[in-house]
Amino acid sequence: MKLTNAGLQNNTAWNEKGYILPSFDRTSMVQKTEKQPTWVHFGAGNIFRIFPAALQQRLLSEGLAETGIIVGEGFDYQIIEDVYEKHDNLTLMVTLRSDGSIAKEVIASVSGAYKCDQQFHKEWGILQEDLSLPFPSDGELHHHRKGYALKRGDGSFHPAIEKDLQSGPEQEHHVPSKAHCTDV
């Protein structure tokens, strides 16, 4: 069993191990998201994967949504390499219930995951292209946690914001500055 698109084809093995698999057409979801994204999320960490991505999975499974989430990571680029790229944008949600049982689900609602930084030219170009497509009126551009912190608890600017203020828009470090450089 491998957590990849090809690995999920052996759904019998996954089901025998107690995993809940996506019940929607993932290929169609990815294609529709590429044509008209409705949700771009900045911040690809654990909280995103278990809460917003799982919520979108429910909407897809119930036929209440047709598109997935495009995720951009502006701080920890290794997440994109080690979690998303290696596993075809699939992740696992494992929940320990109060009765001691464990629920295991493959989360497949992420259609694309990119390093949100100009130094990664190809990924930056894809993210800019996604953000330049017309968003529907109910579309969402969402920053998570580190993505919106401008100041620290003592009132001073976050170090990445300080760098942005000093270096200007061509060498941004903080997610809102990076998103601004996409001309959104």
Image (cartoon, rainbow, N blue to C red):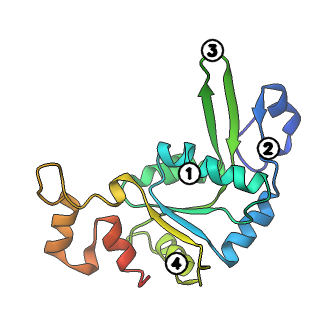
Q: Amino acid at mark 3?
A: Gly
Residue under pointer 1: 52
At label 1, counting other C-alpha atoms closer than 10 Å, the crowd grade (few under 14, some 14-19, many 20 or more) is: some
Q: Is residue 108 visible?
A: no
Mark 3 to mark 1 CA distance (whole Å): 25 Å
Answer left or right for 103 relative to 162: right
Q: Position of residue 47 (x, y in %)?
A: 48, 44
- Which amino acid is tagged 1? Pro
Q: Residue at x 63, y 50 (%)?
A: 55
The tag earlier along the polypeptide, 2 or 3, is 2
In the shown orientation, is residue 149 left or right of residue 45?
A: left
- Residue 146, position as x, y percentages in the image: 33, 54
Residue labelled with disc 2: 8
As drawn, the label of residue 131 is 4
Query: Would you say 182 lies left or right of 27 here?
Result: left
Residue of label 3: 100
- Count residues near mark 2 (Cα–Cα under 10 Å), then give few for <14, some for 14-19, many for 20+: some
Residue 41: image x %, image y %?
Answer: 50, 62
Q: Which mark is residue 85?
A: none
